[in-house]
Amino acid sequence: MNAELLWGLPVIGYLFLAGVGAGALTVSASVLLRGGGGGFAGQHYSIARYGAFAAPLPLMIGCGLLIFELGSFEAGNWFKWINLYKTINLSPMSIGTWLLTGFIGISLLYAYTFLPKSPGLGGNKDSLRRGLAWVSVPLGIATAVYTGVLLGAMPARPFWNSPILAMLFLVSSLSTGVAIILLLKAVFPGKAKDEARTPMVAEYFKQRDNSAYILTASDLMLIGFELLVIFLFIMYAHLTVGAVKESVSVIQFGGSLSVLFWFGVVVVGLLIPAVIELYYVIPKLLNHQPFSVPLGVEIIVPIAILIGGFLLRYVIVVAGQITGPIGL
């Protein structure tokens, strides 16, 4: 085992924040297109608006962390990151640089169209928003997948050398994207709850607003997919002979990262949120009862999912390094 870590928290933070931003943009644009655009009173529009505002900032912060890791904040190297734009080829770094740049630009403009007063757009704000949504779906998916491809493009690191890694990062990105939207929706509930000054009106809005149910049910399915992809990731390593099979031992029971992976990622980040979400989704799904979740649960569950998403990147980045390079 090689314990030297060349990639630390800045890279891990970048992978996590890029995934959150990409997931939020993909979910927002998908919901907006599915809802036909809607209006300010529409549930689809409300979800899309939260996601639009949640998408740009995480990726921008993540890219800042990546620039920091490249040493651009050292004296004399402040503009070292510009070299990424000077070399244009089909390498993952070159493709990723332009992909992330496009993501930041599109996501900022997309979020701008959701502002109540956005001067300069004229009467075409709805059509522009919808057009940007069509671009944002593949752009968000590509950004989420890219974070996994960036690691998988290093065949000398056996833990990362798996075709399932990109899919794992994509599903986790979508799940954390839904989680950040749920969290923002709980912390900033919007005008509907502000106007609900009486218990009768409050109950009316609670029964009418099914956006939380739509998000929670979607996140429950994504958690199920993520558990399946984790299983496939481990099974692929076991079915592959040599260093790939040996490298996955660090997350198996008894391995150096097993507790962090199984308790932090699987139990805290996936299983516990799934059980809690099932508890509130099943009555609505089977018996058509009003979907009502306490505010504390609305906040705790998304935070647990986000913690699990961060720990997933932490475990994968660290595991790929401590298992050491091969074939060098």
Image (cartoon, grey):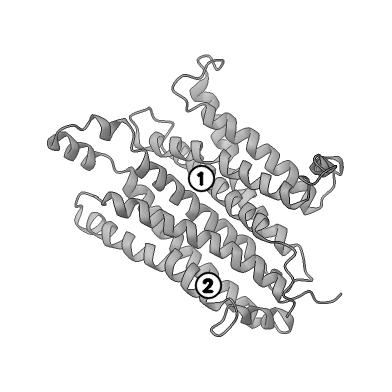
Residue beneath the point at 81% across and 39% down: 79
In the image, taking residue 287 as reference, residue 139 lies left or right, namely: right
The three-letter amino acid code for the residue at tag 2 is: Leu
Q: Which residue is mark 1?
A: 24
Query: In this rendering, is residue 287 above or below 64?
Result: below
Q: Position of residue 235 (x, y in %)?
A: 58, 78
Residue beneath the point at 62% across and 44% down: 61
The three-letter amino acid code for the residue at tag 1 is: Ala
Q: Position of residue 43 (x, y in %)?
A: 35, 37
The quadrant of the image that shows the N terminus is bottom right
Mark 1, secondary structure of its residue: helix
Q: Which residue is mark 2?
A: 260
How many numbered callouts? Answer: 2
Q: Nearer the viewer, residue 253 or 292?
A: 253
Q: Nearer the viewer, residue 8 or 151?
A: 8
In the image, taking residue 272 as reference, residue 70 lies left or right, namely: right
The quadrant of the image that shows the C terminus is bottom right
Q: Disc number at residue 227?
A: none
Query: In this rendering, is residue 324 above or below 62?
Result: below
Q: Position of residue 321 (x, y in %)?
A: 71, 70
Question: Callout 1: few (<14), some (14-19), or many (20+) C-alpha neighbours within 10 Å?
Answer: many
